[in-house]
């Protein structure tokens, strides 16, 4: 996906889909096998979750119907009928974990119609295995806008002789103090000033790896995660408008090769705000679905274009939905602090009303989810099986009495950090506009579920004060350290246990990163080192780099009159992303990357020097 390549496949097809056939075939087969008929639900059957959830009002026309908590072979007969489109045939596709399957309709549903699904399953929130959902009326896509690029300043990008194709945003880091974790820093400059893309720098602020995305695109939520038992790089990539995105989520291995592309399902596009791989190997992602909705309760139109904030859990090998949560099904538009969009038309459509604005999703220790709604100033604990809201933190109708200093506004990156929901971390932007606080804060909130109270456990502030109108995150590090990305502001900061600043850095220019992280990382690129050089008089000057390599201790230069007659002429230590080496004039040269023991890790191509 990176470097301009668009990938059509969800993942390499060593994880095949299991297709059981059309709905009609499945019904006939299971009746022969003696499975219960439609509507015959037995008390011994396990409870099954379904998505769209029973009673949902915002299913997409291209939705699949997901059944979770049952073996695919035990589904029994499934009948699907639309109030306008009639009976739907389709296929059954199994989830890769064997704990569910989805009905994939042959044709889409009609906007505005009611769909009835009948089965012999013990479906949660359904009557005798039968439930209904309503298909929303889509209101178009997210308009494409030219990417924002920040003004140039001196030294705002890095340039390299050996990689003239790269122009990553330059970073400067103050000398870390004693006690700093001193691991690599993961950023994704999103406003240029020349190129956007995932970027790794070390704790001294030196570039480790950068991969530019196509012009007009941006990268977001770049970090290290675990997939199939090994560390991987993950990020979202696509275009963004009005604070939301349309694109794909990608997974790269430690050799910077693509492992998988994760896409939103049901005809939606993945949004930039969240891409979390769960311990079970599924992906939690966000999406935005513009629909026509009655917003008269907030003095809007009865046919307002409203953004439904969508959370999906995706089965990475198959691309199937395992869970879907729609804000419009659970949080009314009256909960928003966001004003209605200005009158008028933009790009041929009225500006959408982004009443909720989902911007983080995390899996809690108990298996349920915590979802952040920026524009409702609230976080929601959500039942992973039904989508029902368990509790609300903040906002207009908080389940908790908010103690002094606990109120947040336009927040990002809400996460439960301790068992039993005792500690919640929040990046409190404090500005939208309007400016609710004088500066942004990274918060730790203590929750008492029995008493229904929220108290301020700690807060982290930046000096000088920063006020971010959007984005930002708080990452918990080992030894109770914290790493804060200041969102719209170009800063990132590591704090020790008592809030002491251990490391502070920033982009040289005014670009920013949606989130910032610190992780240990080891990378060995599949591509060879890059080498360039030229000869002037009796001296040849070489420049060598190996984008993403973390274990290079030194370089050994080979040179000679022909490619077949080269010998080692010099060994030198690694000087950072790019190393400059001077040797006696020679027509040909190559360079070997050496580790700390002197072993050859890789060899560059041989270059002809003029």
Image (cartoon, rainbow, N blue to C red):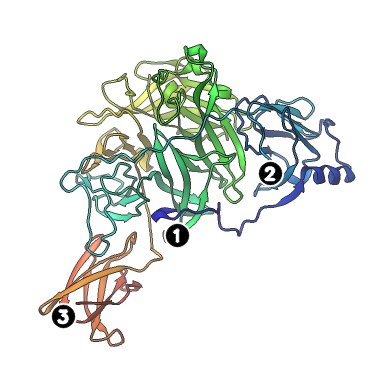
Crowd class of label 2 (few under 14; some 14 to 19; many from 20; radius 10 Å)? some
Circle nearer the N terminus (2, 3): 2
Residue placed under numbered mark 1 in the picture:
257
Measured in 3D between alpha carbons, the distance from the residue under mark 1 to the one under mark 2, in whole angstroms, is 30 Å
Q: Position of residue 519 (x, y in %)?
A: 37, 48
The image quadrant where one finds the C terminus is bottom left
Residue placed under numbered mark 3 in the picture:
585
Measured in 3D between alpha carbons, the distance from the residue under mark 1 to the one under mark 3, in whole angstroms, is 36 Å
Asked if one can make out residue 319 in the rendered structure from this viewpoint, the answer is: yes
Crowd class of label 3 (few under 14; some 14 to 19; many from 20; radius 10 Å)? many
Q: Say which element carries label 2.
A: loop
User: What is the count of numbered marks?
Assistant: 3
| Residue 35 figure quarter | top right
**Cβ–Cβ under 8 Å for marks 2 and 3:** no
Marking on residue 99: 2
Q: Position of residue 278 (x, y in %)?
A: 53, 43
Circle nearer the N terminus (1, 3): 1
Measured in 3D between alpha carbons, the distance from the residue under mark 2 to the one under mark 3, in whole angstroms, is 66 Å
Residue 610, relative to residue 485: is it above or below? below
Asked if one can make out residue 452 in the rendered structure from this viewpoint, the answer is: no
- Between 478 and 59, the one nearer to me in the picture: 59
Indicate left or right for 416 with 464 as reference.
Answer: right
Which one is in front in this view, the residue at disc 2 or the one at disc 3?
A: 3
Residue 542, relative to residue 275: is it above or below? below
| Residue 131 figure quarter | top right
Q: Position of residue 319 (x, y in %)?
A: 59, 47
Q: Say which element carries label 1.
A: loop
Which one is in front in this view, the residue at disc 1 or the one at disc 2?
A: 1
Crowd class of label 1 (few under 14; some 14 to 19; many from 20; radius 10 Å)? some
Residue drawn at 72 percent across, 32 percent down: 85
| Residue 86 figure quarter | top right
């Amino acid at each position: 996906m990176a470097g301009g390549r668009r990938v059509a496949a969800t993942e390499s097809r060593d994880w095949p889909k299991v297709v059981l056939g059309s709905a009609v075939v499945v019904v006939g087969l299971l009746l022969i096998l003696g499975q219960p008929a439609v509507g015959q639900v037995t008390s011994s059957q396990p409870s099954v979750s379904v998505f769209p959830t029973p009673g949902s009002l915002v299913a997409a026309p291209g939705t699949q119907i997901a059944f979770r908590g049952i073996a695919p072979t035990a589904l029994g007969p499934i009948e699907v009928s639309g109030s306008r489109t009639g009976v739907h045939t389709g296929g059954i596709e199994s989830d890769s974990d064997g704990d569910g399957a989805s009905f994939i309709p042959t044709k889409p549903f009609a906007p505005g119609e009611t769909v009835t699904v009948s089965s012999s399953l013990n479906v949660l929130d359904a009557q005798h295995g039968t439930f209904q959902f309503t298909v929303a009326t889509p209101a178009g896509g997210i308009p494409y806008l030219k990417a924002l690029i920040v003004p140039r300043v001196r030294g705002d990008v890095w340039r390299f002789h050996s990689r003239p194709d790269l122009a990553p945003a330059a970073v400067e880091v103050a000398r870390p103090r004693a006690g700093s974790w001193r691991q690599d820093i993961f950023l994704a400059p999103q406003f240029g000033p020349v190129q956007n893309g995932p970027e790794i720098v070390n704790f001294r602020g030196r570039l480790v790896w950068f991969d530019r995305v196509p012009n007009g695109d941006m990268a977001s939520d770049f970090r290290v995660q675990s997939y199939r038992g090994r560390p991987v790089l993950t990020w979202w990539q696509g275009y963004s408008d009005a604070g939301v995105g349309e694109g794909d989520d990608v997974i790269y291995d430690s050799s910077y090769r693509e492992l998988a592309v994760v896409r939103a399902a049901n005809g939606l596009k993945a949004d930039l705000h969240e891409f979390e791989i769960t311990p079970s190997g599924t992906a939690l992602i966000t999406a935005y679905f513009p629909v026509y909705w009655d917003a008269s309760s907030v003095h809007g139109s009865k046919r307002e274009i409203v953004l439904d904030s969508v959370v999906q859990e995706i089965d990475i090998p198959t691309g199937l939905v395992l869970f879907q949560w729609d804000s419009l099904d659970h949080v009314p538009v009256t909960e928003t602090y966001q004003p209605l969009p200005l009158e008028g038309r933009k790009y041929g459509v009225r500006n959408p009303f982004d009443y909720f604005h989902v911007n983080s999703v995390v899996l809690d220790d108990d298996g349920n989810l915590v979802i952040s709604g920026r524009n409702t100033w609230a976080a929601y604990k959500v039942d992973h099986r039904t989508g029902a809201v368990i509790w609300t933190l903040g906002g207009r109708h908080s389940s908790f009495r908010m103690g002094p200093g606990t109120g947040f506004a336009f927040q990002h990156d809400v996460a439960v950090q301790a068992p039993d929901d005792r500690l919640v971390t929040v990046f409190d932007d404090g500005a939208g506009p309007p400016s609710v606080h004088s500066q942004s804060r990274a918060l730790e909130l203590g929750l008492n579920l029995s008493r229904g109270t929220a108290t301020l456990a700690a807060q982290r502030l930046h000096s000088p004060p920063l006020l971010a109108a959007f984005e930002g995150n708080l990452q918990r590090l080992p030894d109770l350290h914290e790493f804060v990305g200041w969102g719209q502001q170009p800063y990132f900061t590591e704090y020790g246990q008592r809030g002491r600043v251990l490391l502070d850095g920033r982009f040289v220019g005014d670009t920013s990163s949606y989130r910032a992280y610190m992780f240990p990382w080891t990378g060995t690129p599949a591509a060879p080192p890059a080498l360039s050089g030229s000869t002037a008089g009796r001296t040849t000057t070489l420049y060598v780099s190996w984008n993403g390599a973390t274990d290079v201790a030194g370089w050994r230069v080979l040179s000679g009159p022909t490619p077949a007659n080269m010998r080692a002429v010099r060994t030198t230590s690694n000087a950072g992303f790019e190393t400059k080496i001077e040797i006696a004039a020679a027509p040909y040269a190559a360079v070997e990357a050496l580790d700390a023991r002197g072993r050859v890790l890789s060899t560059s191509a041989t270059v002809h020097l003029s």
